[in-house]
Image (cartoon, grey):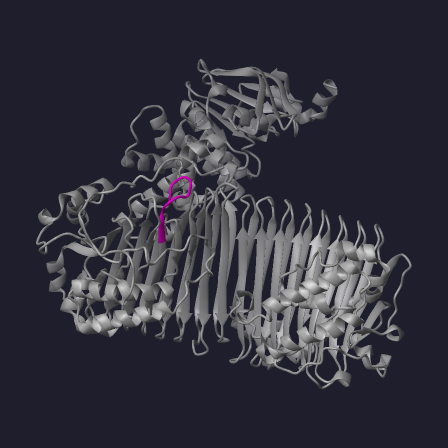
Amino acid sequence: MIRINDLQARVEEKEILSGINLEINPGEVHAIMGPNGSGKSTLSSVIAGREDYEVTGGTIDFEGEDLLNLDPEERAHKGIFLSFQYPVEIPGVTVSNFIKTAINESRKGRGEEPMEAREMLAKMREKTALLEMDKSYLSRSLNEGFSGGEKKRNEIFQMAMLEPKLAILDETDSGLDIDALRIVANGVNKLRSEDNAVLVITHYQRLLDYIEPDFVHVLYNGKIVKSGDKNLALELEAKGYDWIKEENV
Amino acid sequence: MSDEILDEITASEYKYGFTSDIESDKVPPGLNEDVIRLISSKKNEPEWMLEWRLDAFRTWSEMIEPDWPNVTYNKPNFQAISYYSAPKQTKTLDSLEEVDPELLKTFEKLGISIDEQKRLTGVAMDVVVDSVSVATSFKETLAEKGIIFCSMSEAIQEHPELVRKHLGTVVPKRDNFYAALNSAVFTDGSFCYIPKGVHCPMELSTYFRINEAGTGQFERTLLVADKGSYVSYLEGCTAPSRDENQLHAAVVELVAMEGAEIKYSTVQNWFPGDAEGKGGVFNFVTKRGICERNSKISWTQVETGSAVTWKYPSCILKGDNSVGEFYSVAVTNKFQQADTGTKMIHLGKNTKSTIISKGISAGKSHNSYRGLVRVGPRAENARNFSQCDSLLMGNQCGAHTFPYIEAQNPSAQIEHEATTSKIGEDQIFYCNQRGIGTEEAIALIVNGYCKEVLNQLPMEFAVEAQKLLEVSLEGSVG
Amino acid sequence: MTDLAQDLLSSFVIAEAGLNGSKNLGVVNMRKEALDRFETAGFPTTRDEEWKYTNLKPVLKHDYKIMLKSESAVSFGDIKQYLLSNLDTYKLVFINGKYSSWLSESTHQSYDICTFAAALNKYPDVIAKYLGKAAPAGETFVDLNTAFADDGAYIRVKANQTVDKPIEILYITTDENGTSFSQNRNLIIVEQNAEVQVLERHQNLGTAESFTNFVSEVFAAPDARLNYYKVQNDSDKASLVDNTHVNQETGSLVHVGTYSFGGKLVRNNLNFYSGGEHAESHMDGITIIGDGQTVDHHTLVDHQEPHCYSRELYKGIYLGNSHGVFNGKVLVRQKAQKTNAFQQNDNILLSDKAKVDTKPQLEIFADDVRCSHGCTVGQLDKNALFYLRSRGIPKFEAQGLMTYAFASDALEYIKIPQLQKRLNGVIAEKLGINLEFAL
């Protein structure tokens, strides 16, 4: 589905990613772990197309297309979804209005007709129930005055509505208590299928108890230094990141 | 955002900038007592009206043009303006079919075809092209309820007692330079009277257009809501693109008698000048309402047009328990300048006022909020809340806030808040990531920012206002 | 033109002859040009937007004496109560505008704490570099002061020095000259990474009317720190127009606190020019006034460079038929991105006859800024008042306590405990309450 080849990126002269290689196939769940400052969030931002990062080398191929030439919204139309670590507040714009606009713009981008209001409503109802959200969420201003947990749940709600091919969850577990974590993870698991893939970016192993990865990669100093199955995450948790650092001095 | 997007879109020209050819009956430029006599006689006015105009003219002659607003422009040459122009017509029209087809075409281009408006929205229209009314509708439905809704000229002829009683009582002739000028030379406008206890069954609406090169536009609106009545009034305008500046100095007077409620909504989209800041309408308007006991006046405005705007819809809260509201969105782009706000004068006991002002500055424009909240010594328990927010788009524009607060009663409670912010890159990226393009993202964010004001507008107007905001701000984020 | 303006113009020739700095040609020309501008402009009236709410007419109508004589009969005992007790300070005392060496304690050790008159003669280079550079030509009262001022405080703290004790500046007016018009001027220069605290006070000891047109120019070099406290508790015969202009460079921090309790008419023109990145400007104040009094705070923060911070907090409590005015302007220039500016003005009217006019303004020319302002006019919270009374605190004391609580956060930036205590005492006295337990 997505093939990242020797990806290098920098921000303000500072190199953050120095040759990332990663391939994700439909139906797979990958986890990227790493200490603070290893480049995890940069990787997600570069895939989503944030302009603050300059790609200095390598390629990202998404379903046979060069992703790096596309605007952020075009990547979204192709089915890439990023769950933000810090979701942004937009005062006065309701959750329902925002998601309606997002869905219809994506459809327009793919040359499809807008979704019918009735269908939209039914879908919103279904997905709020899935994430155990109160319906009043929908009429609140986007992320404004939301608690950390509410913001994250709202991200997964949008993911459920948009049904992306590749969902990137950037530190989605941070700031969540155990109940919220369970609801969010449950939501993600329900959305998994043969046709889509999930990339989980996290500092801790905790989320991986709930969203079980097929592959775990360790990112350090802008490179993937170790890959393995879910046991690698457990090993990492037990030994700590110093273990990786020592191995890679 | 890249500069290219900015350039690309700021270059999008005024969509409603076209001219229609209608023959005009025009008075030669210049202003003196003879011109005023001529206007008055052309309109077949009674003697008292002529005297009233002449008195206003003499007052005006001794006044100087104000320079305190935070705007700069070349002052109009009042002797170069033609003060009267009427579409050439020999007889009054009975139906739309008789209206100049050229004019109907103009309305179609604007998307406000009268037929359609009539059929779909049930709005009674008093269409003003330049200075004289050419068509009014729904009169019969209104007449059943005793509501008078007609042109000012007609009101002077048909209802002189009402006009004489109220004209100039809210905005006196000598109130300010432009109000005095308007009082001397106004050619037409709307008059509306809602009888005691009557709830006006439909939104009353006037569409203004400035249409004749070099013609000043001096509208006069008088709206009287008798005891316990209710009316919602809509005013909207678009103007064709012109090289030279066009002066518009309207006066709107509202009288809300005991227990009455007036809702006055405006969507204003006059030609703002071209990409170099050339041309565009000067909009120097005096709007004011007076509230008797238990009455309420609510002003809502969405201002996106004009080269220079200078406008402060105000409420004099004279009666006890009266309420004044002001909801405003003012957008400036390119070289536009706006100095706008409101005055809430609390005189009666337990009077309340609310001010919500949302300014948006883009391009090289300047947008100022200027407001006055005054609590008089006898206004026990007066309450005011003001929120004045500014949104900046790009770093070549300015946003300014000049609130004046004058309290002379210890029981007054006044709160004023103001913030300044920009549309964040992170907000736009977030929208992009969810598949929403930058233009749509800005429209979405701006509409969210203005929501408290847009919510005050009647439905069909709110839709038009949203469209206007989008057109006015296309590509302005830097 | 007012009679007073005429008197001033005709007195200038005589005054000029006796003025210090007459040997310094630059200063001579500066004075003449300033006088010319004053002649053209005259005194402002309420038709002038900047003076809309404060009418000077009643205080300008008196027949003021312009050329003042000092008085030798003033003793330390007469002025002691206007100085901070229990605190060692440098002192610069002026009687009717003239420096009184026997009441003062100056120094030239690590820093210059002396008089403006002396500096005009002794430091022509410094004068040329700073005089008139912060206070803008064209402001009527500044021009008038520039033309006439021949004495005042001169403070220059050299780089990396911290002045070991606060400096108190006291301007005394006596009945010696009858109704008197005085014009003094401070020049305060805080060089790189230097630090100083200054207290200033004007006091009319007599019974005749007095009018003071005062200018203070402050220069804060990179990383300099200055706390400048203005205590205004003059007699009801005294009027003051205070013009304080502060130039700030990179990383400097300047706080000006203005505590207004007395005087007949007090106008504070306080202007900050934030001309270096990461400069911090703080201005705050409390006004508590009663019958016959007007206090007008007129502030400007001019943000010229990026990344600067300004904080403004003024609290007003108005009794009797007093009149409070606040006019605060925050100006953010196009270059001054990332400015963070905060402005708040809160007022309580405690009498039917008191009034307040407030005009907080923002003028923003940069888009990436955080600016907010707010102002309120209101009353004490009735529920809180009831709560206090239900706990046995009498109504009057309860009101006083709550009023004090309303005002006191404007005292937080005072770094001299003795001053804080002194001001608390004045507030308690003004509100007629005992604040012992609240402190």
Vertical relation: B243 (above or below) B384: above
Residue drawn at 80 percent across, 78 percent down: C81
Residue at the location (19% across, 44% down)?
B113
- The residue closer to the viewer here, B52 or B467, is B52
> In the image, residue B239 lies at what x, y percent?
29, 47
Magenta-tinted stretch:
B273-282
C170 vs A201, left or right, is: right
Q: Quadrant of residue A32?
A: top right
- In this view of the protein, can residue A53 be seen by the observer? yes
Please identify the quarter of the rendering in which residue A239 is found. Answer: top right
Residue at the spot x=76%, y=64% of the render? C186
The picture places residue B57, in percent across and down from the top left corner, at 31, 68
Is B95 placed left or right of A66 in the picture? left
Left or right: B157 as drawn, with respect to B52: left
Which residue is depicted at the point 58% across and 50% down? C332
Task: Identify the main secondary structure in magenta.
Answer: loop
Task: Identify the residue at the far right of this view.
Answer: C109
Please state the horizontal and vertical placement of residue B23, each as a whole percent of the image. 17, 47
